[in-house]
Amino acid sequence: MISLTDLQHRFGFTRNEVALILFLSMSLLAGTGIRWFRSAGQGGTEFPPASFYAASDSEFAARSAAAAADTVSPRPVARSRPFPHKPALPSASIDINSASPAELAGLPGIGDAYARRIIAYRDGHGRFSRIDDLMHVSGIGPKKFQALRPFVTVR
């Protein structure tokens, strides 16, 4: 019989791996013994006969045939945008000195909170002299600014 040290040396298992293998083997043997014991008490049959499933199989076949014969095709869902809560990107540049919160919120990466921050900065520091001044607004860094650059202007 192979001992634990033989397993460790032959296969290079650690002590924890050998313990896991023993645990799984014992669990498998215990489960097999319990299953055998339960089936012996039921006359040797554990599962219902194949005819037991005949009623549900015929019901499934009937419903599948009815679904396949259904001539009403589902109406395709018309979605103009993948994110309906976000307005379409502006086609022209938006002047950040005169834009409303709703216009600013339509810019990529700008929601209501950023729109309020931009307006608060504009109100507190005066008009933007150039679009690079947007990076002074809290939360707008170089990456977000590069996404905004094509859509904003200063007049």
Image (spheres, rainbow, N blue to C red):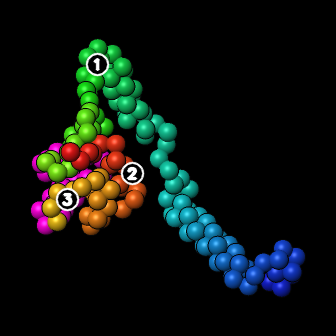
Q: Amino acid at mark 3?
A: Ile
| Left or right: 68 in relation to 94 | right
Q: Amino acid at mark 2?
A: Gln
Assign the magenta stretch its main secondary structure: helix
Calculate the distance from the C-alpha at mark 1 to the C-alpha at mark 3: 49 Å
Q: CA distance from mark 1 to mark 2?
A: 45 Å
**Which region of the structure is painted magenta?**
100-124
Q: Which residue in the protein does label 1 denote? A: 73
Q: Earlier in the sequence, mark 2 or mark 3?
A: 3
Q: Is residue 25 visible?
A: yes
80 or 6, nearer to the observer: 80
Closer to us: mark 1 or mark 3?
3
Residue 41 picture location, percent across and down: 51, 63
Query: x%, y% of residue 94?
Result: 22, 42
Q: Residue at x 29, y 42 (%)?
A: 151
Q: Identify residue for label 3.
A: 118
Residue 140, visible in the rendered structure: no
- The three-letter amino acid code for the residue at tag 1 is Ser
32 lies above or below 53: below
Question: To which residue does mark 2 refer?
Answer: 146
Q: Residue at x 34, y 42 (%)?
A: 150
Cα gap from disc 2 to disc 3, whole angstroms? 16 Å
The quadrant holding residue 153 is: top left
Q: Is residue 139 above or below residue 102?
A: below
Q: Is residue 15 left or right of residue 97?
A: right
